[in-house]
Image (spheres, rainbow, N blue to C red):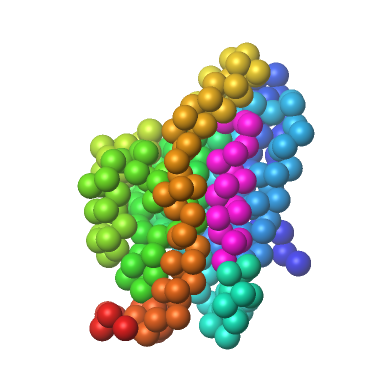
Amino acid sequence: MVDHVTIEKGLGPEGRIAVVRFDRGDGINALSPEALRQLTDAARSFEDDGDTSVVVLTGGAKSFSAGFDLKDAEGRSRQTMDMGTLRRHLKLGPRLTRAWQEMEQVTIGAIEGFCVGGGVALAVALDFRVMARDAHMRVPEIALGMNMSWQSVPRMLHLMGPARTKQAVILADDRISAEEAYEWGLVEQVVDPGKSYEAAMALAAKVAAQPPMSVAMTKLTVNRLAHALDDLASHMDLDQFALASLTDDHKEGVAAFLGRRKPRFRGR
């Protein structure tokens, strides 16, 4: 089994910064089911870590993540799963984003290149996002005949408000530039190309210099208040995704994506 995720601890002030690097080495960084598991395990590995105050999550030099890997063999096997097996398999994504959101440590994403679909879902589960000026985000799920899931819509709503969230999710072919992402509130800082990791580490150092317990308790309080109704608002998104995956429009969307052509949706 190939390790797509590496963890380095003991960095920065008092050694209180850790870096989680997700890099498949292919310039695309798609989220295969195995990559989802490894990233989830990485987040959970900090549960009893009292020595780390901040975790920086970064991708490769060319991309944060292209989103779910539609070409992965395990991922494609969803097409033949019964509904019960499919629902269990679809929990991999929300389990990942929940693990990162619920970390006691402050989390910072360093985004270079492109951040697409599941990459956006992971990014908005973090506390802060630093984005290179030439990078972009895109949410292609609807163009693939699916809904945006992994409990991402409430998180995006908190950051951008309802109109911008609809714009980002529904207008699936539109790229969101770094400047737009900053203007909309989707990211907190835009930096020169190739500098997102350096800027994320500088921000992490400022956080790591603060009293660890006060920082952790403040994050917990803010998250509990901000996300109190998220489960109520998005508890059905997994089943909506499962239902959408059975439609002809979803099959057409994926076929069009793989065939590099425009899809023809019929509402079926």
Is any part of residue 56 visible from this angle? no
Answer with left or right where residue 176 lies relative to residue 60.
left
Residue 241 image offset from top left, x and y in percent: 45, 68
Q: Nearer the viewer, residue 264 or 28?
A: 264
Percent x, y for residue 41?
70, 51
- Quadrant into which the N terminus falls: bottom right
Q: Please state if 51 lies on the left or on the right of 201 as rendered.
A: right
Q: Is residue 38 left or right of residue 264?
A: right
In this rendered view, identify the residue nearer to me: 230 or 46.
230
Q: Is residue 86 visible?
A: yes
Residue beneath the point at 54% across and 83% down:
79
Residue 101 magenta: yes
Q: Residue at x 61, y 61 (%)?
A: 92
Picture layout, residue 40 above or below residue 206: below
Residue 184: image quadrant is top left
Could you tell me which quadrant the C terminus lies in? bottom left
Magenta range is 90-106
| Most foreground residue, 19 or 222 | 222
Answer above or below: position of 142 versus 4: below
Residue at far front of view: 232
Q: Pinpoint residue 121: horizontal percent, then vertical percent.
A: 46, 52
Q: Residue furthest top?
A: 211
Image point (74%, 26%), residue name: 50
Query: In the rendered image of this protein, does residue 264 appear above or below residue 191?
Result: below
Q: Quadrant of residue 3?
A: bottom right
115 is within the stretch colored magenta: no
